[in-house]
Image: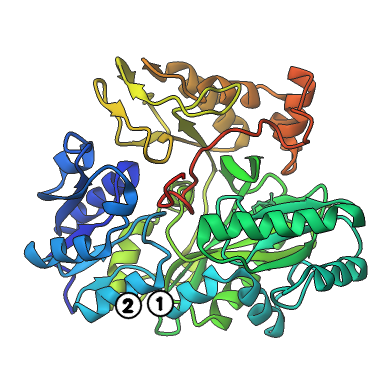
Amino acid sequence: MNLFKKILIANRGEIAVRIIRACKELGIKTVAVFSDIEKDSLHVRLADESICIGPASSKHSYLNIPAILTAAEVTDAEAIHPGYGFLSENPQFAEACATSGITFIGPTSENIRIGGDKAKARQVLKRRGVPVVPGSDGPVASEEIALKTAKKIGFPVIIKASAGGGGRGMRIVREEGELSQAFHTAQRESLAAFGNSEVYVEKYLSSIRHIEVQIISDGKGNIVHLGERDCSVQRRHQKLIEEAPSPISTEKFRKRIGELAVKAAKAMKYQNVGTIEFIVDQDQNIYFMEVNTRVQVEHAITEELTGIDIIKEQIRIAAGFPLSYRQNQIKPSGHVIECRINAEDPERFIPSPGKLTFFSPSGGPGVRVDTAAYAGWVVPSQYDSMIAKLIVHGRNREEAIAKMKRALDEFIIEGIKTTIPFHKKVLNHPDFIKGNFNTDFIEKMNVRTNGNNNGNGNGHKNGNKLSEATAGVDEA
Ligand code: ADP
């Protein structure tokens, strides 16, 4: 068995650079693809070869399946790594790669199909004994059925798009009178964003944490989990800061949530790298929420915690190699925190694209910066606004926080606005320092510090950041 000689990376930005780095260390040649406004991008410079695949609009470039497959064919790339967002969770793309004799570096198209149908994934896992958030048994076809389900499980409920991602197509319903409108809005939003109006109903749980588990499966019966990540610091259901381990975690908790994640992966016959997302309530009850069938933005914190290069494992497994370690060989060490640095106004979270007149990332012991940004680069308005991931690794949480504060102070970006001031505020917040926060932490913090929450309990309404899950969806 051999590793690939050449891989095409069907992505851009920091994740394309991250994949190129893994390939270089494995001795694999790389092909970058780019839209015509990105010829000066770092991923293009760092790859061995590069090909323009279309105009700026991602629909015509990074989502253009025929152009990407043609680029792979003319460059003799044997495999394609999709990164996150764009085509990474598109089962047709995975199948089109196979038809063209190109290896898709990721899960099977069947895995992607189940993961992309959140109502179905719930059903499948519930049947296999994985606890899910109480709610509808599959999709709900009408407002009447949604109401019946809501009455059965009790308000508040959340109506969610089966095909949802990036916090879109979700509506919280606090009482019966709000249900009809919320149901139709969620359907409409889902149809517009994902081309599918199917929704389902879940109990809306309060005071919860978002805790997820990284899993790796070689498809030959070997599955391991790499521990949990706490992604509860969110704004409008989108992650801003992640950390590992979770501040609430104990050996026992990690074992329990890890075993549930492995059980879920086995039930799905999962192959390659994936994340099982859970909601954890105050009594530490764990409920399955969804599975992400791609490498995630926050994979890097698990890499730092465990010393395992997740991208290299993805490539090795796709090439047919078995997992190189067992569960008892995975030893998390210390504490890792990640801040997502977005080209956004830190107060209103609206995009702030433009030219970086100065760019000096933080460094020093225990600091990792994953970015494709450099001084002089123009942050495009067409794509995800995340321009860097600042990751710190300390011996314990206290040291990690001190390092992150130091690294945030040191990071200099000029020419655009970024979320660095927001992160500084969070890192200095007494509840964050105590590890005492839930998914509503940012909304509550904004209410306390700004004296308003825009009236909708949801923070500001007009931010249009694209998340990793929807990075490929053009904002229309
Ligand atoms: P997406 O795929 O759009 O990111 P998720 O299902 O992962 O959607 O949910 C995103 C976030 O929304 C969660 O991290 C959590 O904060 C919140 N959320 C989702 N479902 C519930 C629920 N049943 N109760 C409370 N909060 C929820």
**Residue occupying image coordinates x 79% and y 67%:** 143
**Other-residue count near label 2 (Cα within 10 Å), few / some / many at <14 / 14–19 / ≥20:** some
Return the residue nearer the eye: 197 or 217: 197
Is the residue under label 2 in contact with that under label 1 (CB below 8 Å)? yes
**Other-residue count near label 1 (Cα within 10 Å), few / some / many at <14 / 14–19 / ≥20:** some
Q: Amino acid at mark 2?
A: Glu
Quadrant containing ligand 1 reads: bottom right
Q: Report whether 251 appears left or right of 363.
A: right
Where's residue 144, x and y in %?
84, 71
**Residue occupying image coordinates x 42% and y 48%:** 474
Q: How many marks?
A: 2
Sequence-first disc among 1 and 2: 2
Where's residue 79, x and y in %?
21, 68
**Residue occupying image coordinates x 80% and y 62%:** 285
What distance separates the C-alpha of mark 1 from that of mark 2? 6 Å
The residue under label 1 is 109
Task: Examine the rendered structure and indicate whether residue 194 appears above or below residue 198.
Answer: above
Does the Cβ of the disc 1 residue fall within 8 Å of ligand 1?
A: no
Q: Report whether 2 appears left or right of 451.
A: left
The residue under label 2 is 95
Secondary structure of the residue carrying tag 1 is helix
Where's residue 113, x and y in %?
49, 75
Secondary structure of the residue carrying tag 2 is helix
One can see residue 58 in this view: yes
Say which quarter of the image contains residue 268: bottom right
Does the Cβ of the disc 2 residue fall within 8 Å of ligand 1?
A: no
Return the residue nearer the eye: 128 or 217: 128
Q: Amino acid at mark 1?
A: Ser
Quadrant in which the N terminus appears: bottom left
